């Protein structure tokens, strides 16, 4: 599965002529016991493949240059979306950004709810942090 995933990623990049000027890294880890982990599993033998698709932000860029790179990266990852969906790939929490489009944001929320125990997380979060001191815009936005 993970080698096929990588081959499909590379095939998409080549077919769509996507400039991919940074390495695509792949690594493997054991499962996690944490229910909110992308690597959560009850199977002690399960191994998870992590694939990092990145694009560097070179220093010295002005706002326009940074925006161009950001737009290119968004197009890059959007083009890879069907491959992610085919294999059930999900982003690591550190790589999630709230979608700007309201329809896409709702789809993102629905995907997270399908994957993680979001309702249970929010119940516990409300009990332990009733004033949302440890909240942030991302978590408050995507975990509704």
Image: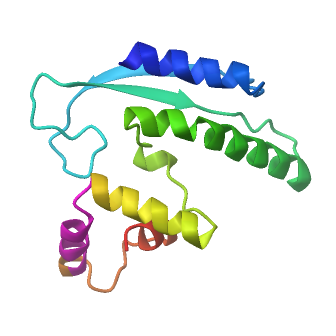
Image point (47%, 72%), residue name: 141
Q: Would you say 86 lies left or right of 78 here?
A: left
Q: Is residue 112 magenta?
A: no
Q: Where is the C terminus found, in terms of image quarters?
A: bottom left
Q: Which SS type dominates the magenta stretch?
A: helix
Residue 73 image offset from top left, x and y in percent: 71, 41
Image point (69%, 34%), residue name: 55
Residue lying at the far bottom in this picture: please name it.
Answer: 131
Image point (27%, 45%), residue name: 37
Q: Where is the N terminus found, in terms of image quarters?
A: top left
Q: Would you say 47 lies left or right of 65 here?
A: left
Residue 118 image offset from top left, x and y in percent: 27, 65
Residue 12 image offset from top left, x and y in percent: 64, 25
Location of residue 14 by image quarter: top right
Q: How is the image coloured?
A: rainbow
Residue 49 image offset from top left, x and y in percent: 36, 24
Q: Would you say 53 lies left or right of 120 here?
A: right
Q: Tell me which segment is drawn in magenta.
A: 116-126
- Is residue 93 or residue 135 the one in the foreground? 93
- Is residue 60 or residue 13 the one in the foreground? 13
Please determine whether, in this image, residue 69 is positioned above or below residue 129.
Answer: above
Image point (58%, 62%), residue name: 99
Please determine whether, in this image, residue 91 is positioned above or below residue 67.
Answer: above
- Is residue 2 or residue 53 the one in the foreground? 2
Q: Is residue 119 magenta?
A: yes
Q: Report the number of numbered marks.
A: 0
């Amino acid at each position: 599965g993970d080698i096929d995933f990588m081959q499909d990623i590379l095939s998409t990049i080549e077919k769509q002529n996507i400039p991919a000027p940074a390495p695509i890294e792949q690594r493997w880890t054991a499962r996690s016991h944490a229910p909110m982990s992308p690597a959560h599993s009850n199977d002690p033998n399960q191994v998870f493949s992590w694939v990092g698709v990145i694009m560097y932000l070179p220093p010295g860029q002005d706002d326009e240059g940074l925006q161009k790179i950001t737009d290119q990266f968004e197009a890059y990852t959007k083009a890879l979306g069907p491959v992610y969906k085919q294999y059930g790939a999900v982003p690591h929490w550190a790589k999630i950004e709230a979608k700007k489009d309201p329809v896409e944001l709702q789809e993102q929320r629905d995907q997270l709810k399908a994957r993680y125990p979001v309702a249970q997380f929010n119940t516990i979060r409300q009990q332990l942090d009733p004033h949302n001191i440890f909240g942030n815009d991302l978590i408050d936005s995507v975990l509704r």
